[in-house]
Image (cartoon, grey):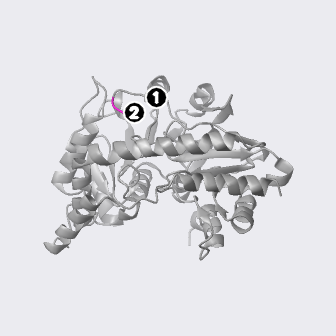
């Protein structure tokens, strides 16, 4: 087996979840998904497809009607003056994870230099390592209660030797979001260095700041169609479809036929009945997503002030996503976040994700962080969880 695969670490989030498996008394906030089920009209579309016998392969790049719908949906979210998104730039994938891995496979060779903005969902840093890349990280920093990116540091890290920049905004786990000015600076710089950008924008719609289109800023708002830009999306978060495994990529049109070849050698295609569900989800987005975002904002505005009121807890208010990333400041007691998260499961009945899972080679200043997914159907569960954390901190 390849050494890069042997070197992969077991998911820390899964380690914590395994510690709580079978315990009905644990309040579970460790995974990045809502506990709401998929709306019935989406499920019904998949059932109808199966009943009609749509159990065969589709085109590698996805059903033409779904690619058209994604193109129209994405174009409708763009700011005035943005280039429309043509269906010829779309590849339907078997989930957002698959979309990101396909992009990395398409762009990265062994020995290539890749820069990633961290903390970030661990798959985004593991994928280039699987390909044998040389990974460099630029870390966000909490400043005056808000996560910030040192643009000078990032741009200095991206040189003509940098093959790929990976950036996730809105960010998992911090909720940090790139501004339009930061995106423009990054795009202009990468044009001069010849660096590709892989933008994970799956939380684009889960954004709480006021904007004309209800979305976080996207690189697609300012990029040309042939820029070295690949944007990954997913149906999972915005449409309550995590288990369905359906996503898509937006890429330069010259790249799309080659991506179809990669899809063939990975999954052949996304299942047709799941694509039918995605098509109906897009048609009903005015009902599903705005309601979801409004509820998530209520969840955020319930959880974060309660955490901020706890002595020894540092937390910034996330602008997007579905997570509160907070720190227990007593490093002597809470230094190793994985062990702390395991203790919380056993001793407090509270399931959170360890902050170490989102950092590459974390140093002392990275210790003590935990991620709380606040996408809870019952907002009262969030308050109950904080009560458990508060009691545990005073033990």
In this rendering, the answer to whether 212 lies above or below 173 is: above
Mark found first going from the N terminus, 2 or 1: 1
In this rendering, the answer to whether 144 lies above or below 228 is: above
* Residue bearing mark 1: 183
Q: Label 1 near label 2: C-beta < 8 Å?
A: yes
Q: Decide whether residue 214 is among the magenta residues.
A: yes
Mostly what secondary structure, the magenta segment? Answer: loop
Q: Residue furthest right?
A: 332
Q: Where is residue 39 in the image (x, y as percent from the top left)?
A: 31, 58
Q: Which residue lies furthest to the bottom in this view?
A: 22
In this rendering, the answer to whether 176 lies above or below 50 is: above
Of 87 and 159, which appears nearest the observer?
87
Read off the magenta span: 213-219
* Residue bearing mark 2: 219
Q: Circle 2 sits in a helix, a strand or a loop, which is it?
A: helix
Q: How many labels does the image show?
A: 2
Q: Circle 1 sits in a helix, a strand or a loop, which is it?
A: helix
Q: Where is residue 309 in the image (x, y as percent from the top left)?
A: 71, 40
Within 10 Å of disc 1 (Cα), the crowding (few <14, some 14-19, many 20+) is some
């Amino acid at each position: 087996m390849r050494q890069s695969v042997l070197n992969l670490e077991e998911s820390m989030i899964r380690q914590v979840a395994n510690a709580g498996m079978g315990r009905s008394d644990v309040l579970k906030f460790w995974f990045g998904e809502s506990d709401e089920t998929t709306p019935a009209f989406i499920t019904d579309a998949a059932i109808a497809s199966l009943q009609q016998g749509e159990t065969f392969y589709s085109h590698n790049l996805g059903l033409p009607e779904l690619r058209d719908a994604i193109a129209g949906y994405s174009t409708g979210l763009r700011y005035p003056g943005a280039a429309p998104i043509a269906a010829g730039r779309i590849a339907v994938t078997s989930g957002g994870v698959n979309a990101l891995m396909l992009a990395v496979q398409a762009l990265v060779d062994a020995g290539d230099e890749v820069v990633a903005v961290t903390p970030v969902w661990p798959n985004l840093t593991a994928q280039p390592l699987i390909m044998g890349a040389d990974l460099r990280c630029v870390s966000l920093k909490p400043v005056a209660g808000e996560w910030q990116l040192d643009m000078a540091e990032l741009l200095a890290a991206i040189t003509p030797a940098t093959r790929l920049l990976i950036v996730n905004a809105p960010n998992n786990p911090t909720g940090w979001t790139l501004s339009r000015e930061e995106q423009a600076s990054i795009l202009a710089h990468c044009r001069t260095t010849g660096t590709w950008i892989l933008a994970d924008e799956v939380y684009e719609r889960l954004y709480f700041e006021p904007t004309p289109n209800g979305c976080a800023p996207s690189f697609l708002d300012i990029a040309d169609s042939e820029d070295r830009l690949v944007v990954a999306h997913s149906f999972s978060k915005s449409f309550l479809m995590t288990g369905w495994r359906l996503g898509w990529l937006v890429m330069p049109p010259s790249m799309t036929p080659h991506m179809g070849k990669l899809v063939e050698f990975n999954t052949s295609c996304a299942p047709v009945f799941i694509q039918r569900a995605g098509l109906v989800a897009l048609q009903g987005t005015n009902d599903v997503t705005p309601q979801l975002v409004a509820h998530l904002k209520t969840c955020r505005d319930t959880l974060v002030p309660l955490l901020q009121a706890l002595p020894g807890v540092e937390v910034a208010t996330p602008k997007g996503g579905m997570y509160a990333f907070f720190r227990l400041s007593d490093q002597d007691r809470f230094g190793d976040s994985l062990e702390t998260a395991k203790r919380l499961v056993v001793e407090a009945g509270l399931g959170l994700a360890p902050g170490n899972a989102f950092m590459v080679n974390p140093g002392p200043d990275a210790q003590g962080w935990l991620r709380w997914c606040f996408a809870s159907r019952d907002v009262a569960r969030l308050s109950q969880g904080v009560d458990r954390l508060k009691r545990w901190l005073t033990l």
